[in-house]
Every structure is written in structure tokens, then in C-alpha cells.
Amino acid sequence: MASFVDRVTLHAAAGSGGDGCVSIHREKFVPLGGPDGGNGGRGGDIILVVDSGVTTLLDFHHSPHRKATGGRPGYGDYCNGGEGGDLILSVPNGTVVKDSSGNVLADLIGVGTRFVAAQGGSGGLGNSGLASRKRRAPGFALKGEPGEERTLILELKSVADIGLIGFPSAGKSSLIAAISAARPKIADYPFTTLAPNLGVVQAGDTRFTVADVPGLIPGASEGKGLGLEFLRHVERCAALVHVLDCGTLETDRDPVKDFDIIEAELAHYGGLSERPRIIALNKIDLPDAKTMADMVEPIFRERGYEVFQISAASHIGLTELNYAMARIIQEQRRNQAKEEKTRIVLRPPAVNDSGFKVTANEDGSFTVIGQKPERFVRQTDFGNSEAVGYLADRLAALGVERELFKKGAKPLSEVRIGAGDAAVIFDWEPSIEAGAELLAGPRGEDLRLESPWAGRYIEDDVDELSEDEISMQWEYSAENPRDPRVSAEQGGET
């Protein structure tokens, strides 16, 4: 059974918001109590949090589907529904969060770092929250929004200062056990190490972490062996230490050849060319290995590398190697301190952006895409005619109808709000505000142009009209209910 997993797929589903409540206050001797429906509760979020006690993504490997609880619906007497509980998921330090397309969404470094993997839906307003001067007793409420559903890829990249790289059985695990308190499994056969090991090293006043990369072999960057799966664990390292086996019994291998092969794999993997290198010629406690180390050391020094002859088994040369690694770490930390003084301005996207886009399709239909229009649709109870009318008012106030009119939409044109299976399709019935009076027919057949009073409004020309003219204009408006000038008997304003 796997005990170390560093790449998983997480299916996160946040909780849906609760629906708003439709309720009218009822009390003895109070016939018109008014609306008192409460709002629905917010759905729970799914949040990733870096936990120092977690070192692997194994839990997500066994349980990749995670779902937060939804909010409860509202109640009467102005009682709001309860909120759904957030689902907190612990991840190791150094977890990278990507979407299904491979785009990096977050790089979680540091204990306590949080990332909202999926956001819960908002609760719907009750009819008490929808009441206004014009709508005193709404007979509908808004539905809660569904929670966000996302498919995320989690990758673990170890947060280590120094990376130990080399062929299998080169002595990486023995070296990390000798310089730190880590106790990895050690044996004399290839691929003993099946997961990266981390150890903490103290050199003078400098404390740093060291990680080894299991089993790099020729072709590792192309998927051979175990190296490709663990090369990502050295991406954060400030320096790389080549642990070269000077006592190998294989006739076709030598330290220089091993070094060139590993460097070719690193170059093919990419992103590690600027890391400082240190050469550690291991196993010099063996007579033949010491001779080999003396032969190849000048070659590496000519290439400009810092070389140390060590023995992980007998601890020869480990102190000098530790202080060499500490110097690189100190320099890197000083450079980071200088870079942190630069002010970085983050500009996140606007929340609840009211922008939308109307597209005219080739088949004569129209598509409306935008955060607010799609949200309005999700909140609407299409089984309630009053709620549908409220949706039309919201879309008109947002400017959707006016934009449809500009794009050439006509009455009963097919309009789609949203995309995919969640889209809502309806036949457009424009309002007067959107230019419906012009779309009713050709301009010459417009009802207002048939009147002798066309273009003359009472509020604009009342001082210029006689009493008989005003009376005739009122009669014309009453006979034509589609005319924007509505008579006082119909509730219009003059």
C-alpha cells in the first residue's frame, strides 16, 4: 500500500446557499402584518490549510471527493437560515494547487497558509428583504446559489534548502542520516528510497533542511525509474549537491560519467540550471574509492565546481560539506531579504463584476454571458410568475435588454443566459425601456405617430395647450395602453 503520495486530483464541491423564505406576518387584530420571510444561510467553503503535521497527500488519494455542507433555508418572523460549515482540509507545506488545465492557482508555503478551493453559494433573500416602496408584499423569494464545484490538481514540492541528487545507491540516504536526525531506510540495492527524505542540519548558527531525490537514472526526465516523479521536490532548493559514488563496482560507470548523465536529466527537466552545484565524492573510506576520488577531483575543479571528498559511513569530510552548504544558504537568505523590500501590488479581479456580453449567433438567437445575469437566473424560482417578473426587472435595470435591442433582437427572439447545461433559454419580450414600442412594427405604423399629438407630452407642453387639447390628449392615452403616456386612472404619473 502506498504511504507517500505527492500528486493527487481533488474534486471539491462547496455547499449550496439556502433558499429565502416567503412568509407574511400573522397576528391577531393585525390584518396587514407585512412580509417577514428570512434569508437563506451561506453554503460552506472548502479551504486548504498548510499543516506542519501533514507530510503527504495520501488522504486525498484515498478520498478525492470532498463536499461541504449547505446553508439552511430561511424561516418566518425574520429568522435567517443557518450557515453551512466550512470544510478545512490539511495539506503539507509546499503544496501547489492547479486547475484541470494545469494553471497554477496557489503555492501554499508556510504553516497556516490558506486557500479557498471552492466557495460556498450565497443564501437567497427572503421576501422581507425584497420588499420596497413599489413592492410592499412580495409573494416570492430568491433561491440560494449552488456551491462552486472544481477539479483541482495538488502537487507536493518539498520545501528544502539543499537537494541531494545522484544515482541509486550513491549514498544519499546515508549522507542525510549522517548529517541530520533523519533515519531513512538504507540498503545496498537500487531504489531503496521510494519517497523524498528530509533532514534538518545545523552548521554553526545556520539551520537548513536537506532533501534527497530517489533514484535518478538515465531517462528519468522522460519517465524512466522514479526520478521524474520526484524531480519536482528539488525545484525549491537553493543548491544541489551531486553525491557521486566513487566505490561503484559497475565497470561502465565512473563519477564524471554519472555527473554528466544526471546533469543531462536536469537540463531536460528544466528550471534548475541556475542552481549552485556542490560535488560530494562519496565512499572514500574504501581504498579504490579514494584513488578514484583523487583522480576525478581536478576534473571537477577545472569545471568550476566546489568539490569535497566525503564518507557518509565514517563521517569523513562532512563538517566541511555542511559549512559549504550553509554559506550558500546564508547568501540566498540575504538576497531574499533584499528582494522582499520591493513592494508588490496585487490586483485581484473585481468581485461581483456587473459587466456582461451579448453575442448575436448565426441562427438568429442571442447569448448573454456575465456574472450578474447568470447569478440572477440561478436565484429565480421559475415556477413563480412574480419571481420571473422580478428577474425581467433586474435584467432591464442592468442594461441587458437595451444591449439586446442594440444587437438587433426582436420580439420572441431566442435568448440564452449562461453557457453549457446550466444556461436558461427563453423567448424575449422587450419592455418599453428597451425600445419595444419601436419593435412593434414599421416606424410608419407606430401608434404614437398616428396621433395628432405625437411627440407632444403633457409634462413638456402643458403650458402651450388649451384645456380642450389637454382633454383630447388624455382621451388618446387612455385608448392606447401601450403609449408611454398612461392616464391617471391606470396609475401613471403625469
Image: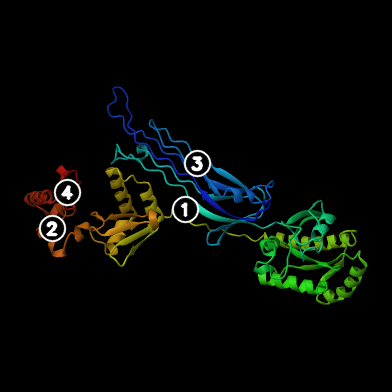
Disc 1 element: loop
Residue marked by disc 3:
69
Q: Which of the two discs, 3 and 2, labels the residue nearer the N terminus?
A: 3
Residue marked by disc 4:
486
Pinpoint residue 220: horizontal percent, then vertical percent: 69, 67
Q: Which mark is residue 76?
A: none
- 112 lies left or right of 348: right
Q: Residues within 10 Å of mark 4 (few under 14, many from 20)?
A: some
Does residue 279 lie above or below 72 as drawn?
A: below
Pinpoint residue 306: horizontal percent, then vertical percent: 83, 70
Q: Residues within 10 Å of mark 3 (few under 14, many from 20)?
A: many
Q: Nearer the viewer, residue 5 or 449?
A: 5
Q: Picture quarter containing residue 323?
A: bottom right
Q: Which of the two discs, 1 and 2, labels the residue nearer the N terminus?
A: 1
Pinpoint residue 81: horizontal percent, then vertical percent: 44, 36
Disc 3 element: loop
Real-space Cα distance between discs 3 and 2? 56 Å
Which circle, 3 or 2, is nearer the viewer? 3
Residue marked by disc 1:
351
